[in-house]
Amino acid sequence: MSAHQQTKVISILCSLCCMLGLFILIYVLSVGPVIAIFSYSNGYMSPEQIRLVNFLYAPLSWPTECSASYRSLFQSYVDLWLRLI
């Protein structure tokens, strides 16, 4: 493999890693706005919406069962968005 091809492969891998990191960041930060929008669309969240949010954001809610500080931070973030929207 030539030096140009290696540079191109490394550039593509770096771009993919950055895109993956950005996707993860957007996923984590989207939990608050999503819950707030669902909550205020009808004044409450329907059982279907609750199931959808629980399914989509299950990986973010699992640590709340083990860590009180994470649970407090998570709840504060969601509450912030509930007040903003």
Image (cartoon, rainbow, N blue to C red):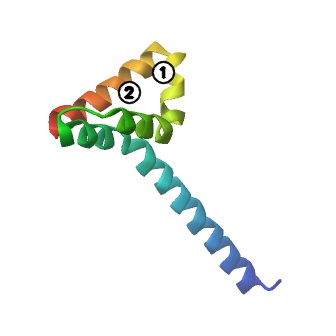
- Residue drawn at point x = 48 percent, y = 28 percent: 61
- Residue drawn at point x = 48 percent, y = 21 percent: 64
Above or below 16: residue 73: above
Question: Is residue 56 rendered to the left or right of residue 45?
Answer: right
Q: Amino acid at mark 1?
A: Thr
> Mark 1, residues whose alpha carbon is within 10 Å: few (<14), some, or many (≥20)?
some
Residue 43, horizontal then vertical, whole percent: 17, 34
Q: Amino acid at mark 2?
A: Phe
Q: Tell me how far mark 2 sits from mark 1, CA to CA.
A: 8 Å
Q: Earlier in the sequence, mark 2 or mark 1?
A: 1
Tell me the residue that label 2 is attached to: 74
Question: Is residue 65 rendered to the left or right of residue 5?
Answer: left
Mark 2 secondary-structure assignment: helix
Which residue is most to the right?
Answer: 1
> Mark 2, residues whose alpha carbon is within 10 Å: few (<14), some, or many (≥20)?
some
Tell me the residue that label 1 is attached to: 64
- Residue drawn at point x = 68 percent, y = 78 percent: 7
Which residue is most to the top?
Answer: 68
Near-viewer residue (83 or 14): 83
Residue 30, disc: none
- Residue 38 occupies quadrant: top left
Above or below 11: residue 20: above
Could you tell me which quadrant the C terminus lies in?
top left
Mark 1 secondary-structure assignment: helix
Residue 51, horizontal then vertical, whole percent: 43, 35
